[in-house]
Image (cartoon, helix red, strand yellow):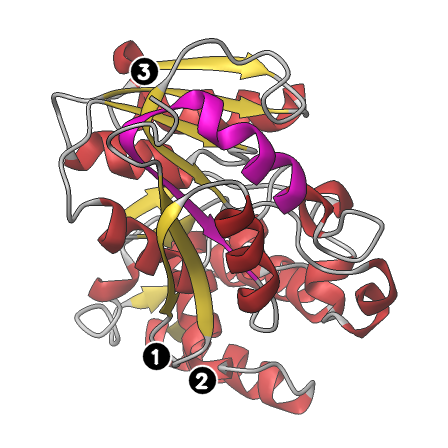
Amino acid sequence: MTTVQGGLRALTSDFLRDGIPNAAREARLLLAHAMSVPHERMSLLAQDDLSEDVLQSAYVMASRRKAGEPISHILGRRSFFGRDFFVDERVLDPRPETECMILEALKRDFKVVLDLGTGSGAIVVTLLAECPAATGIATDLSEQALSVAIQNAKTHGVEDRLGFEVSDWFASVVGQFDLIVSNPPYIAADEMDALQPEVRLYEPRMALTDEGDGLSAYRRIVAGAPAHLTPGGRLLVEIGPTQAADVSTMMEEAGLVSVRVLPDLDGRDRVVVGEKADIDPQT
C-alpha cells in the first residue's frame, strides 16, 4: 500500500509524461476528488495510507484527462468568483476572465438583471448571490443548459429570485431591466479549428461560435437592448479580444451612451459597457 504522497507523485509523473499542463495541480485535484476530501487538505494527509481502490479510481479519471476531457467535467465543477458551479458538456465552463464583468456590474446597485445566453448560470447566479435584494431572469436557447443553470441557482440559494426562459436572445423576454449581461458565442466559424481540443470537442458548439463572423449575437443583443433597458440601465457584454471596436460602434449606433471597453486581468479587451440615457433625447 502506498501513501497519499506516493500516489500523488505517481499521478504527477504520469501526467508529465503525457504533457498535461499544470500536471502537479491537476493530479492533486483528481486524487483529492477520488479521496472525497478538499484538495486543500492533501498536504495534511500526505503520509496517510492510500487504498488501491482509491488510487485506481484516480487513474481512471486521469485517463479521461489524458484523452482531452476538461478537468472541470471530470470533477463536475468549476470555480467562479469564489463559488463552485456544476458544469458538464451541456454548458460553457465559466472562466476567470469573465469575473471582470461581475466586478463592473457590482459597481452600481441594480434591482432586476437579465442574463442572455446564461449557460451554467454562473454570471447571473453570482450577481444575485452578491446582491440579496435583486431579482433576475436567465435565458438560453438550450433547455439542457437551463437545467444546469437551475441546478446552480438552487445550490447557491437564489432560485426564488431567478426566473428561467427558453429564448432566442430577446424573443421571449418581456419587460425592462436595469442591468443586462451576456457572454454570447463570439468565436468566428473559421477560428474554431484553432481552439484547444478540450474546448472544441467537449464544450457546446452553440456556446462558442455563431457559425459566422463572431459578431452576429452582438448585433441582435445590442439592437434589442434599448427597448429592454430602464433609463440609466446598463448593458455589459463579454467580447473576444479583437472585437472591442466593432461592438462599441454597435452600441453607439443603437443610441447607448457612456460606452466603454474594460480589460481583463491579462490586459486584453474583455467587456464592453453601454448605458441607456436617463432621459430619452426625443422627449
Alpha carbon distance from label 2 to label 3: 42 Å
Q: Is residue 213 left or right of residue 4?
A: right
Label of residue 9 in the image: 2
| Residue type pointed to by label 2 | Arg
* Residue with the mark numbered 1: 5
Q: Residues within 10 Å of mark 3 (few under 14, many from 20)?
A: some
The residue depicted at 53 percent of the width and 77 percent of the height is 11
Kind of residue sitting beneath label 1: Gln
Q: Does label 2 or label 3 sit earlier along the sequence?
A: 2
Q: Secondary structure at mark 2?
A: helix
Report the residue at 64% width, 58% height from top. 60
Q: Identity of the amino acid at label 3? A: Glu
Q: Magenta part of the protein: which range?
A: 218-239
Q: Nearer the viewer, mark 2 or mark 3?
A: 3
Q: Residue 120: x percent and y percent? A: 50, 36
Figure quadrant of residue 58:
bottom right
Task: State the image quarter where residue 267 is shown.
Answer: bottom left
* SS at badge 3: helix
Question: Label 3: which residue?
Answer: 159
Q: Residues within 10 Å of mark 1 (few under 14, many from 20)?
A: some
